[in-house]
Amino acid sequence: MMNINKMTALDIGAEIKKGNITAVDAVKAFYDTIESTDNIINAFITTNKAEALRKAEDVQKKIDSGKLTGSLAGVPIAIKDNICTKGMKTTCASKMLGDFIPVYNATVIEKLEQAGVIIIGKLNMDEFAMGSTNETSYYGSCKNPWNTNKVSGGSSGGAAASVASNQVPMALGSDTGGSIRQPASYCGVTGFKPTYGTVSRYGLIAYASSLDQIGPIAKSVQDCAAVMDVICGKDERDGTTLDIKYGGLLESLNGNIKGMKIGLPKQCFDKGLDNQVKNSILSMSDTLKELGAQVDYIEMSFLDYVIPTYYILASAEASSNLSRFDGVKFGFRAKSFDGVTDMYSVTRSEGFGDEVKKRILLGTFVLSSGYYDAYYRKALQVKSLISKKFNEIFQNFDAILCPTTPTTAPNLDQSLSDPLQMYLSDIYTVSANLAGLPGLSIPCGFDQSGMPIGAQIIGAPLDDKKILNIGFAYQQNTEFHKMSPKGV
Amino acid sequence: MKITKEIVESVANLSRIKLDEAATVKMQTELGAVIDYMEILNSLDTKEIEPMSHIFSLNNVMRDDLIKPSIDRQEILSNAPDHTDETFVVPKTVG
Amino acid sequence: MNYEIVMGLEVHVELATKTKIFCSCTTEFGGAPNTHCCPVCTGMPGTLPVFNKKVLEYAVKAGVALNCDITRYNKFDRKNYFYPDLPKAYQISQLYLPFAKNGSIDIKTRSGLEKTIRIHEIHMEEDAGKLIHSPTGNETFTDYNRCGVPLIEIVSEPDFRSAEDVIAYLEKLKTTFEYLGISDCKMQEGSMRADVNLSVRPNGSEKIGTRTEMKNINSFKAIERAIAFESARQIELIENGGEVIQETRRWDDNKGLSISMRSKEDAQDYRYFPEPDIPPINISEELIEEIKNNQPEFASAKVLRYVNDFGITRADAEIIASSKYIAKIFEDTVAICNEPKEVRYWIINQIMYLMNDKGILPEDINLSCEKFAEFIKIATSDRINRPTAKTVFEAMFFASHDFDLEKYIKDNGLEQVDDTDSIREAVLGVLSANPNTVKQYKNGQTKVVGFFVGQVMKATQGKAKPDTVNKIVAEELAKL
């Protein structure tokens, strides 16, 4: 009998299509693993086994009758808990939304269901996607399957850890400053943040609207491309989605990167970068050269400015986006208060965790009268500058190769004590969000302690195909993405 | 820019977040550190640069003025911590 | 000392689109609480706004009609504040780039003063919900049906000096927007709301005093009262050596006073920033041109045309043109019957009277212009006289469109009597019944002729043709 848990999503889809296994077999297999491992990993906040099995039966009937023919029909997926699922708790890993049951489905959920993909649960994350370690979750931190003393990364920690530990073949995360790519890197899986506007945000509980983007985490670039083919596209409910016809991303992958020009940003190989990470990236660069790409060093002079710019913009938008959590229409309301204003204050103080409160206060500060120009407006100007610099780079280069993170996954309980250090773990990822660029993180090695190292490929706006193809070429010639943690 | 206790209190009030004395002091330190770190942006000359609020030059995304059915009131109210059959309920807003 | 009142207005006008500004729920007024709602307008997590095309069209129409410069590159901004009527805890509005600026509008007050009011800016935004306060308990109930109804806010310069100015301006806005078909501007339903920024200064002073902003003024009558109260309050404060504090005050029309809304907790800082969920809106030259070229004929142009083409007085023309609906009745009826003066007569003397008497709004008049024209034809013939015509008009005014004029006249025997013999009989009857008055006539008091005519009309139940009555009364009196 084949080991469904270790298979890629596309392989599972193919086996279901061939009739070798059923959608129900797949769902059962993954629930078996969730049930046996999640007490340690803590990747899931909510599971819905009975409902998922019922859906799997329905989907299987449609596959049998030829009504569902997509490459992912019958394959299970798990969803980061900030994406609204109708009738299924969506908590944002916050006490504030502990009992929140959306009355509508996010656009991506509708699309997945139409494609016959089966949702098997909702994934742990940093509270309201604010954090880089998954430790700000109200429901406890999600552990790294490679070493459960280490963090899974964040904010989509549950998404990366669940795929890495074979609890699910693919997951949806969201990425505001690196929240798909960074945990994917820490957990040794493949994570993709598409060009801003490629995937509808309708139903994604907003952290920073101008930066948020939904994307897949899976075991291979091909799986990510297959998920993208299902979820991307213009949505009339999200005015920021782009009207682009991609054609099939999966179909377009050919592994041919001959003559492609890839830039290595000098500044990313300076201070703060772990040596083992550095060597893995350089070795990946050699592999890409062997495959026919041309690799040169480039200047990314703005690197020191990206974190401050990101935190100003993201916190400002968050302070506004999270104002609706006031104990009136949904979610938590404090038990004891004095009048309506106090009800707001007590509810929000009790309902939000410390990191969320801090970012709300920071965002409120940078937007407040007297400080707007010095901080918020300034950050919008720097964003413009960064975007312009990227445009210049992409006039001469097809893609940028750099580490996803400066180090491999840190130990639990280490980062939150030094918030600035935690913020710095996003230094290589946030600029793609600021400029709206597609970014891919793929496994490219391990450090001495056996923790995975991730490489990031960043492309020009709408060059999603191109960077997925670079990742695909690399994965065709390497085995890092096929590794699983011990005991899984 | 020094983050004073008054700034923290005023920002907390605007944010409708209640901080006790200890939390106020802690926030003052942590926000102070973050904002200090942000000062690095001041070393960039951005005088001639237009602030960029939207990353791509997408514009005029509009819908037609066509009515779609509203959703069931029960659903609108289903997640409210306090509601009647018809409305949300909050503490009285006028004296 | 004498003081001058200086006021600027912030007028909110609900646009008459079918759907809300950022979602597809209906904007229909009324409806059970929270039944015109969806995840978007109730601010559910994860939802996003999508801008209604029609709102832009209506807004630009208003901007063009108020002679504004139209902003080509537009953005929305978020205005952040907590209040239970605002489910997202921010209102999507425009601060940095309002769609219209630097406009003006000419007004004429009831006492005939003509002046120009400058418009500072107009911006688009979404309306908030309604709060219903429990009369006994310690609860407030929230109804989000109005959340997301499109508004434009028209901010004037401080060009008003009296309540009369303010009312003339609001009436002009109402008429203009009615002609444009972009709003019904009903103050009582809240589709037009005015906040008054008011300050006072000694006569002759150039410096503008500290102002207060008064909210919650819901009728023209309330505007007069609120302005009188607030200006007197400020003058008294200053006279007693006090100082006016810049603040927002709430007008309480029942108590007849304004109350400070200031509280320490509400230090206002709206933290505006560009709305990231809505891409910028470019208003094209073509759209502006198209709107300019297709503007309706406004009241002032109609007045001129009515005076010049139809020969009616300016005063009457102004009354007719002050409402799009009345003007339409006038024009459509004249187009059919070609009797402008007659139509004017019935509008000014009957329609205006009936509206006033029964509290009917112009837009609610349900009068078929075909019927009205048919009526004019009958009224100007010899078939019914004026007093009877009034009765017929009133019946027609309140009836449905299938009202049968001929049948009504016939069934009620209202046809004018022009039968010389029967009228003569009535005249002779009146003369013999009033010997004393006949004596007065003989003594040279010719005024009493009118009395005889009146009595004859009465005796014939108003149906006798007045000309014939006059003639026969004269003949019979001459025989005496």
Image (spheres, coloured by chain):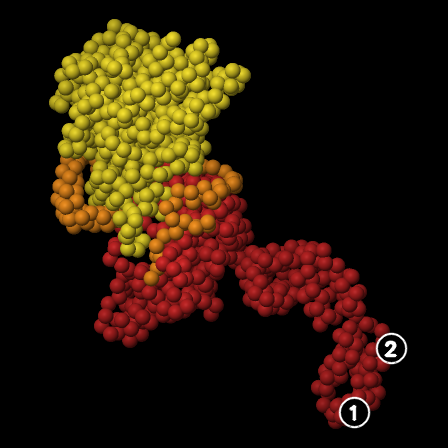
Direction right: furthest residue: C421
Up/down of A310 relative to C236, above or below: above
Residue C435 disc label:
1
Are discs 1 and 2 less than 8 Å apart at CB?
Answer: no
Is A483 on the left or on the right of C435, as rendered? left
Q: Say which of C238 and A352 sits in front.
A: A352
Secondary-structure class at tag 1: helix
Secondary-structure class at tag 2: helix
Q: Which image quadrant is residue C319 in? A: bottom right
Location of residue A173 in the rendering, given as x and y in whole percent from the top left corner: 32, 26
Is C160 on the left or on the right of A418, as rendered? right
- Residue at the spot 17% in from the left edge and 25% down from the top edge: A411
Question: In what quadrant of the picture does the C terminus of chain C appear?
Answer: bottom right
* Chain B, hue in figure: orange
Chain coloured yellow in the rendered structure: A
The amino acid type found where label 1 is placed reads Pro
- Residue at the spot 37% in from the left edge and 13% down from the top edge: A4
Is C322 on the left or on the right of C4, as rendered? right
Real-space CA distance between mark 1 and mark 2, rounded to the nearest whole angstrom: 22 Å
Q: Chain of mark 2?
A: C
* Chain C, hue in figure: red
Location of residue B85 in the rendering, given as x and y in whole percent from the top left corner: 46, 49
Q: Residues within 10 Å of mark 2 (few under 14, many from 20)?
A: few
Question: In what quadrant of the picture does the N terminus of chain C appear?
Answer: bottom left
Location of residue C108 in the rendering, given as x and y in whole percent from the top left corner: 46, 64
Residue C421 disc label:
2
Residue A153 in view here: yes
Q: Say which of A470 and A173 sits in front.
A: A173
Q: Sequence-wise, which precedes: disc 1 or disc 2? A: 2
The amino acid type found where label 2 is placed reads Asp
Residue C195 in view here: no
Up/down of A67 relative to B65, above or below: above
